[in-house]
Amino acid sequence: MFSQPAIEQLLNQYTLVELYTDVVPPQHQPTTSADENRASLSKDFGTAQLPLYVILKPLGDGKYQEVGRYDEGKINKTFAFTEFLRKHLPPQGEITQTKADGI
């Protein structure tokens, strides 16, 4: 799904972040552990849902605001996911930093 041109084009407009909650790949170490990441997922987002797709707006000082969440874990509706990504992009010409947290 993520390699589909329409989805790929939209995702390229975000800063993508992955939170490893099972095993942290060796190339990403040293970092927080999978256990710490699972705890962070529950604490910061109030869920243990995997995968979880969240769009965050950075506020500075390590803080962020959640601006969008895709409720469906497994993406079954490509159109709905495309609309989710499109809906949270800034209007054309407006420059902002937006993050997508794809877990």
Image (spheres, rainbow, N blue to C red):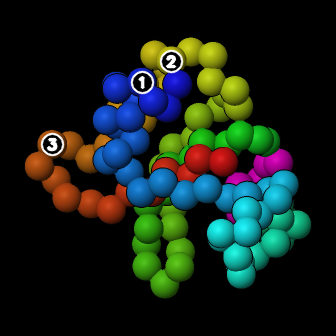
Q: What residue appears at the point 73 percent right and 62 percent down from the top-left corner?
A: 25
- Comparing 79 with 44, the one in front is 79
Q: Please tell me how crowded label 3 is: few (under 14), some (14-19), or many (20+) other residues with Cα within 10 Å.
A: few
| First along the sequence among labels 3 and 1 | 1
Viewed as shown, does residue 87 lie left or right of 93? right
Instruction: Identify the secondary structure beneath mark 1.
Output: loop
Q: What residue appears at the point 42 percent right and 57 percent down from the top-left corner?
A: 15
Viewed as shown, does residue 6 lie left or right of 61? left
Whether label 2 touches label 3, CB < 8 Å = no
Give the residue number, with chain letter if any, for mark 2: 78
- Comparing 23 with 95, the one in front is 23
Residue type pointed to by label 1: Gln
Give the residue number, with chain letter if any, for mark 3: 92
Label of residue 4 in the image: 1
- The percent coordinates of residue 93 (x first, y second) are 11, 49
Q: What segment is highlighted magenta in the picture?
A: 44-48
Q: CA distance from mark 2 to mark 1?
A: 10 Å
Whether label 2 touches label 1, CB < 8 Å = yes
Q: CA distance from mark 2 to mark 3?
A: 23 Å
Q: What residue appears at the point 43 percent right and 79 percent down from the top-left corner?
A: 60
- Comparing 39 with 66, the one in front is 39
| First along the sequence among labels 2 and 1 | 1
- The percent coordinates of residue 5 (x first, y second) are 34, 26
Q: Quadrant of residue 99?
A: bottom left
